[in-house]
Image (cartoon, grey):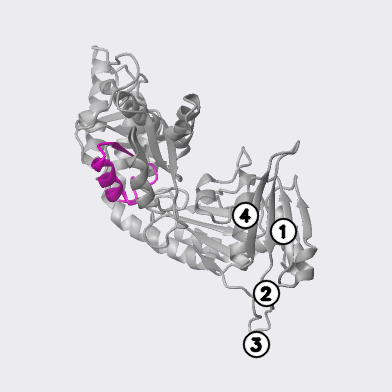
Amino acid sequence: MSPSPSAAANPIEVDARELRCPLPVIRLAEAARDAPAGTQIVVLATDPAARHDIPAWCRMRDHELHEVTDVTDATHPYLRFVVVLRAQRAKAGGSGNARQRPSREM
Amino acid sequence: MLPTARATLLAALDEGWADPRRLYSEGRRARALLDQAREVIAHGLGVRPAEVSFLPSGPAALRTGLAGLRYAARRHGARMVASAVEHSAILTTGRFHAAAAQDPGLFEEVRVDPLGRVDLSALETAVAAGGTILAAVQTANGEIGTRQPLERAHAACRTHGIALLVDAMASLGRDPVPEHFDVLAGDARSWGGPGGLGVLVVPERTRWRRPGPVSELEDGRTDVEPVVAFALAAAEAWRQTEATRERQSAFSASIVARLRSAARNLPDVEVVGDPDDALPHVLTFSLLYVDGEALVVELDRRGFAVGSGSACTSSTLEPSHVLAAMGVLTHGNVRVTLPLDPVAPTLEDDVSRFIAELPEAVATVRAQLGVSDL
């Protein structure tokens, strides 16, 4: 599946400000669940763990972290992430477990 | 604390209560006991007794070690270098000095790889910068277990004539004693001794000077009097742990291997740290979509005490700087640190029960967040 321009033109925004970990990542995953490849998701977060955990989620789920910005020119500074979804991983053939994913060892 | 160390501690409160600097017989007795404890620990660490000082804790020994290196080198510079996964006693001190001098270049935190091991070429570049006086590198990280390449770090320091400060708080009693250091700090708790006793090793060859008035305590390296009973208990624990260390470490490693394979079978998990070149008794993993605090509480309810580096479990709400520096998932983090076996005679059975209950505990906290289909 190739990125669709219409999806990229209308990014989904996930405002996870004031939510504490792991909620920002959960909100992002919920938004990504049914979205097609190429969709841009913009996540706003204030939780300090999001700086590490949103990139980690992108790596674990094989999506692209396009951009991270520290937005400091606001009364309440926050982080802004732009995530671009890649194709969902192929379903595990014959196992009947569509959500199966390999675990990772670092 | 080991049961024999506890017994020694209680007996020592009777025997060694007096001020070791006094000349009456109780004072002389306390002095003899303190010297005896120092000899045991110095012998174990492969250094001379005069090179060993007792401080109130491992972190206190680390801070004192750093302060004396800084002061002795003050005419050569003030820049310090540390791996990004060092103990906060090092990192906060380094950042404080840089901030106080309004010069961020006075403290450099050297990046680590995804396994948590310091980037040697970045370290070599960092110690080569003018005005650098010391580098701080730990033997191994107590949070993730990964061992650090001390021999090469020491070689890099020597090339530039700077000191290597080694934090051995996580490894003493588990791994062989380090050989590559200019100043070493440890904590008696790591080898089954009591809290309240840190060890600072300053070899004779090292340029080290306490920034403060002359003290007659601990060869002038502190102005805090050590508790004789703690030192004796620490020496007793050392004797016992060192005698069985190799067997214990092999046993711990076999249990960690079981825990590792159990952790890897959990859905959406990152097992962190080096799977091979690491402390034998530590296993850490992070679980996607899991609230670390909820999981620690759930495991506690089931009778298991685990640590966590997740932000929600810390008083500052910041995630562990170690996990952050490695770039791994910080939420849903669980850290299993195996106790020494005299402290936990039922360890094998406890671990079997932990392995059996862990998937259900994780599923329980994930269900609370409604994330089963993400």
Relative height, residue B152 to residue A88 (above, below)? above
Q: Are marks 4 and 1 on the same chain?
A: yes
Task: Provide the chain ID for the residue under circle 1.
Answer: A
Q: Is residue B297 left or right of residue B132?
A: right
The Cα atoms of the two marked residues, 4 and 2, are separated by: 21 Å
Q: Is residue B292 one of those drawn in magenta?
A: no
Camera sees residue B48: yes
Per the rendering, the mark at residue A94 is 3
The Cα atoms of the two marked residues, 4 and 1, are separated by: 10 Å
Question: Which one is closest to the eye, mark 4 or mark 2?
Answer: 2
Question: What amino acid is at disc 1?
Answer: Ile
The Cα atoms of the two marked residues, 2 and 3, are separated by: 20 Å
Q: Earlier in the sequence, mark 3 or mark 1?
A: 1
**Figure quadrant of the N terminus of chain B:** top left
Q: Residue at x 67, y 74 (%)?
A: A87
Question: What amino acid is at disc 2?
Answer: Ala
Q: Mark 1 = which residue?
A: A26
Question: What amino acid is at disc 4?
Answer: Asp
Question: What amino acid is at disc 3?
Answer: Gly
Question: Which one is closest to the eye, mark 2 or mark 1?
Answer: 2
Q: Mark 2 = which residue?
A: A87
